[in-house]
Image: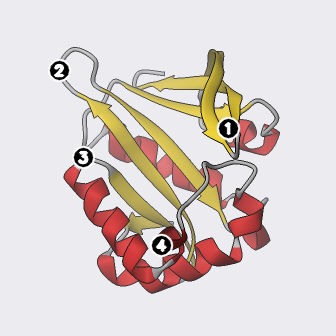
């Protein structure tokens, strides 16, 4: 259901982001125009890999249906990371995000030996909260004015999953 994102995915990712631009706008920061190009996606992948981000494509058959990233990894006594994900609007509600989160958790707690994985959702993003809850995440708090989306700082709910849960 997931696989690492590759540089050759740039075209497909750019097309998918472009097709979902309006759908994602209420959930994500404002993106520069180059974000929606194949070169922009390849550049983004290079930066992610240099920053110990683990980007994955969420697959629907052979097609990319979205992405899930494991990022902000802190080692030593914390052993923690954060996930973020999205699914193509036309493929929402089919369990793709739920499955992808489960696979990334197995990778995080197995291969990367993390102790904790966290996630944040907009307060009103109930479908994303359900994805996290189905994967054993617990709600741990509210982050006021956590992320700027458009011109507004928005509140997010915080979730965590521990390796031994």
Cα–Cα gap, marks 2 and 3: 15 Å
Q: Is residue 12 left or right of residue 75?
A: right
How many C-alpha atoms fall within 10 Å of the one at disc 2: few (<14), some, or many (≥20)? few
Residue 90 position within the rendered picture, expressed as x and y whole percent measured from the top left: 78, 72
Whether pointer 2 and pointer 3 mark residues with C-beta atoms closer than 8 Å, the reply is: no
| Discs 3, 1 touching: Cβ within 8 Å | no
Q: Which residue is mark 2?
A: 76
Quarter of the figure with residue 23: bottom right
Mark whose residue sits in front, 1 or 4: 4
Precedes in sequence: disc 3 or disc 1: 3
Dot 2 falls on a residue whose secondary structure is loop
Badge 1 or badge 2: first in the primary sequence: 2
Q: CA distance from mark 4 to mark 2?
A: 36 Å
Residue at 62% x, 21% y is: 138
Q: CA distance from mark 1 to mark 2?
A: 29 Å
**Residue 34, which numbered label?**
4
Q: Earlier in the sequence, mark 4 or mark 3?
A: 4
């Amino acid at each position: 259901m997931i696989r690492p994102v590759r540089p050759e995915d740039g075209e497909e990712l750019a097309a998918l982001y472009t097709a979902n631009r309006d759908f994602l706008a209420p959930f994500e920061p404002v993106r520069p125009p180059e974000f929606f190009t194949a070169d922009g996606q390849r550049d983004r992948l290079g930066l992610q890999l240099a920053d110990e981000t683990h980007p994955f494509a969420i697959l629907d058959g052979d097609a990319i249906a979205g992405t899930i990233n494991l990022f902000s990894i802190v080692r030593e006594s914390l052993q923690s990371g954060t996930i973020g994900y999205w699914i193509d609007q036309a493929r929402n509600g089919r369990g793709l995000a739920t499955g992808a989160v489960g696979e990334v958790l197995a990778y995080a707690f197995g291969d990367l030996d993390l102790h904790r994985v966290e996630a944040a959702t907009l307060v009103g993003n109930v479908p994303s909260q359900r994805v996290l809850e189905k994967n054993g995440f617990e709600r741990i708090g509210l982050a006021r004015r956590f992320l700027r989306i458009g011109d507004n700082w928005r509140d997010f709910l915080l979730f965590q999953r521990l390796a031994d849960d």
